Amino acid sequence: MTQAFASEESEALSPEEAAAAASNCTREFRANPHPVYAALRDKAPVCPLSPPHGVETYLITRYDDARAALADPRLSKDMYGAIDAYHRIFGDSSIALDDNMLFSDPPKHTRLRRIVGSTFTPKRVESLRTRVQQITDELLEQCPKSGAVNLLPEFCFPLPLHVICELLGVPENERKQAQEWSATVAQTGFGPEARKKLEIAEGNLRDYLVDLCARKRQEPDGGLLSALVSAQDQEGALTDHELVSTAWVLLFAGHKSTAYQIGNAVYHLLSRPDQKALALRDANSMNAAIEEIFRFETSVENSTFRHAKEDIVIRDVLIPKGALVQISITGANRDPEMFAAPEELDVQRPNVQATHLAFGYGPHYCIGAPLARLEMQLALTSLFARFPRMTLAVAPEEARWMTVPFPAFRGLAELPVVLDPS
């Protein structure tokens, strides 16, 4: 099914069918969630779900509701405050890695973000430009030039992984293993067998990061992780627990979302030659195209869970205290009340950078947004400059999207391309 058919198919879905698909995370929903989100936006914009984990959950799909919810202090990001629900969904293994700014509320969130922000600065990110370009060129030089190649493992994933590892100070010979553990975490669903795999991978990552932080404390190297080890504000330094958890979220979030986003961008531009031509006119055109792709097919499908600290009413729907709330970034970014012809990719769409929600909104706005934009700009510009005749190796409608039974990331399962058809 191509994206062009998404709005047409939504007409055939009842609110009950859409809610059931979202609740059960069916393979069809995971392969193409847009018809489901369109149906829910239209008829059930604040929708109670019945997920397999059994925790009462509400899904928000309209833009204005999503934007407001992302900044609503009544919706807590501190999952320790909903620990019973947390255990039922994730088990015990994730807790040790979730003591960071992503899963906290003020004042703790304010303190953690201030410390991380003092080290993860735009100046530090911009200083990476030359090195990011070098990594990009090296990866493209190594890509197989004859026949079809899956661009995800050859380019889309290694690029942001190498960049975030260099930023943090992860030794080169340890990056592949860290990536494999992260991939297990990102692609594991629910169920006893899946949870066991998750526990092993998260345990390995936790042990590795504890050791890495200890090494940085003994031998500082000027990288971001070394800076975090010694960083303090007026309220003190990061605790050991917070330090390891912060390293985890920067490593994981710092490459997974960007990797899938690069893949989504390549796929959609190759599927639409007219849009690709407009994007490639100059640097400003490419930057505008990247922002539109963030809107059109963001790799972060839903925000991480929030829970209601009190009874909340949104669009006449009561979300009871203690219930979980999911905010559909994908659904909000295609809301026709906010974006004209939202099911169309328009790389010349005005003002999209200021309006899309791909990086969230409010206090939890993604601190890594400048790095993600830099990587996207250099990756796409370099890729299309080096391989101007690159084509998809399959028809666009035959591309396979991930169907992992949890809507965290939206991305391709594989991206087969022919880099040089000659």
Image (cartoon, grey):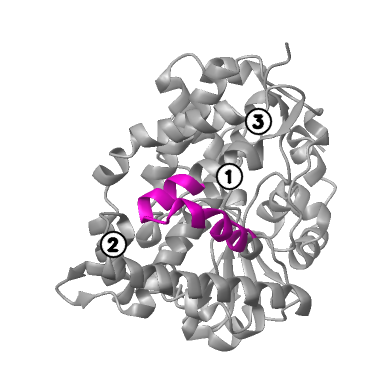
Q: Which residue is mark 3?
A: 268
The reply to whether the C-beta atoms of the residues labelled 3 and 1 are less than 8 Å apart is no
Residue 315 vs 77, above or below: the answer is above
Residue 296: x and y in percent read 59, 38
Q: Residue at x 62, y 65 (%)?
A: 185
Which amino acid type is shown beneath numbered disc 1?
Phe
Q: Is residue 285 above or below residue 263?
A: above
> Mark 2 or mark 3, which has the lower sequence index?
2
Amino acid carrying label 3: it is: His
Residue under label 1, please give it: 157
Query: Where's residue 404, x and y in %?
Result: 74, 59
Query: Picture coordinates of residue 369 (x, y %)?
Result: 40, 47
User: What's the residue at 74%, 72% (across, down)?
Assistant: 194
Name the front one of labels 2 and 3: 2
Task: Give the main secondary structure of the magenta stretch.
Answer: helix
Residue at image mark 2 = 226
